[in-house]
């Protein structure tokens, strides 16, 4: 009996290394509130990710909410501020916008790299637009230059959902350094993790104090509470996991690359569309999305054929938020390209220790599904 294969598998550092890392917590009894490990991880991540300033938080979703709540122009008269975003993403992105009191305005994605279609952003900008929130989906880099110039032209801040793009670089520049703010997720299923966790990269320092305060009940240093903040502090056990995992990131990327390229060589020119390569981009091989051009029915056949063999793929991202009961009919934005993608995409298993034999076996099943 073969073992089941899931779409991802959490990275585990050597057990002894983790135990060694957490040992001194039994002496210090300092388990949270921006402790020693928290501070060390923050510094190491700023260096690794090549970002000017990074704040650790409890999860990637909270990072997005913090970023949105730090915006000054919360709303114009009698309206919720609008945030232009794309729907081809994990539901967290849309939920964060709505939970922060804003109205999402859905912009379509481009069919090449599945990120926000920059030719369609400007027509969606109104008096009430308070931010643009694009997603580096699957670690594919948005058209950061164009988005920056739009943000500048209309004086609208840009917040990136960089949850998929840990370690990605553009021409040697860290992906988290783009936009006014970029948010990472360090969830157990992501390329790098702290069990649960995330980070807000604050590239425009005007947001820094407020984000730090909102993370800690609204406290500004010892001056008392000036914001209605929540509790988003990363604890020391999570930070310790991050410190251990970070040591393996280069090795992890190399292994992921091997798996990714094996899929690519077996599936290219076989009637599927694959994730593109992008110029000057150092990638992280986080996901292997397979676009089944034939559409939903064929995708379902492949999904089931793999499942029968104990292989569990994911329809990332299906359904789109606009199709969910909680959002249906509520928000603006026609997104036919995203809709088509969501009906044809299947993310295949991808993690560092996935064997190439298993990749070959999975590709065999996919190619034999008629
Ligand atoms: C994982 C993810 C999030 C949420 O991160 P958590 O750490 O799970 O809260 C947000 N956006 C995208 C695109 C994600 O993939």
Image: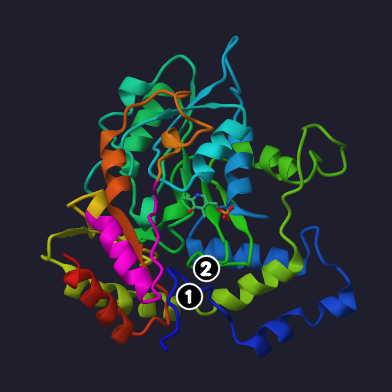
Taking the image as shown, residue 347 lies to the left or right of residue 179, namely left
Q: In this view, does 75 lie above or below 286?
A: above
Residue depicted at x 59% and y 68% = 44
- Give neighbour class at mark 2: few <14, some 14-19, many 20+ (Cα, 10 Å): many
Residue depicted at x 59% and y 30% = 71
Quarter of the image with the C terminus in it: bottom left
User: Could you give the CA–CA distance between mark 2 and mark 1, rounded to whole angstroms?
Assistant: 7 Å
The residue labelled by disc 2 is: 192
Indicate which disc residue 249 carries.
1
Taking the image as shown, residue 1 lies to the left or right of residue 149, namely right
Q: Is residue 8 above or below residue 12?
A: above
Closer to the chain start, of discs 2 and 1, is: 2
Q: What stretch is highlighted in magenta?
A: 298-318
Q: In this view, does 19 lie above or below 228?
A: below
- Image position, residue 248 (x, y; %): 51, 79
Residue depicted at x 32% and y 27% = 334
- Give neighbour class at mark 1: few <14, some 14-19, many 20+ (Cα, 10 Å): some
Q: Element at badge 2?
A: loop
Q: Nearer the viewer, mark 2 or mark 1?
A: 2
Most foreground residue, 228 or 148 = 228
Most foreground residue, 349 or 112 = 349
Q: Find the residue positioned furthest to the top.
A: 77
Q: Are marks 2 and 1 in contact (CB under 8 Å)?
A: yes
**Magenta-drawn stretch contains 307:** yes
**Magenta-drawn stretch contains 370:** no
- Image position, residue 135 (x, y; %): 41, 45
Q: Element at badge 1?
A: helix
């Amino acid at each position: 009996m073969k073992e089941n294969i899931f779409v991802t598998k959490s990275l585990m550092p050597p057990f002894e290394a983790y135990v060694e890392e957490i040992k001194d917590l039994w002496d210090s009894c300092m388990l949270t509130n921006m402790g020693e490990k928290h501070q060390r991880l923050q510094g190491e991540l700023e260096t690794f990710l090549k970002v000017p300033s990074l704040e650790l938080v409890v999860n990637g979703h909270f990072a997005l909410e913090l970023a949105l709540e730090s915006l000054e122009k919360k709303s114009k008269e009698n309206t919720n501020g609008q945030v232009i975003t794309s729907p081809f993403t994990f539901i967290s992105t849309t939920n964060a916008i709505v939970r922060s009191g804003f109205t999402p305005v859905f912009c379509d994605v481009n069919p090449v790299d599945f990120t926000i279609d920059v030719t369609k952003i400007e027509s969606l900008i109104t008096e009430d637009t308070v931010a643009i929130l694009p997603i580096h989906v699957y670690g594919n880099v948005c058209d950061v230059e164009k988005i920056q110039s739009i943000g500048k032209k209309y004086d609208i801040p840009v917040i990136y959902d960089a949850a998929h793009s840990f370690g990605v670089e553009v021409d040697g520049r860290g992906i988290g350094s783009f936009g006014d703010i970029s948010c990472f997720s360090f969830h157990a299923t992501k390329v790098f993790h702290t069990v649960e966790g995330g980070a807000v990269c604050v590239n425009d320092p005007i947001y820094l104090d407020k984000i730090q305060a909102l993370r800690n009940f609204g406290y500004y240093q010892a001056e008392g509470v000036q914001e209605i903040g929540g509790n988003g502090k990363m604890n020391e056990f999570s930070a310790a996991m991050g410190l251990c995992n970070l040591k393996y990131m280069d090795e992890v990327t190399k292994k992921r690359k091997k798996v990714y390229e094996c899929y690519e060589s077996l599936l290219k020119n076989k009637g599927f569309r694959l994730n593109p390569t992008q110029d000057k981009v150092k990638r992280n091989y986080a996901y292997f999305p397979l676009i089944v051009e034939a559409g939903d029915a064929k995708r379902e056949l492949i999904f089931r054929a793999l499942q029968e063999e104990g292989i569990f793929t994911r329809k990332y991202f299906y359904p789109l938020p606009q199709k969910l009961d909680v959002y249906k009919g509520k928000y603006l934005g026609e997104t036919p390209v995203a809709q088509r993608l969501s009906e044809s995409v299947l993310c295949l298993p991808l993690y560092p220790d996935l064997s190439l034999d298993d990749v070959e076996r999975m590709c065999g099943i996919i190619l034999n599904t008629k």
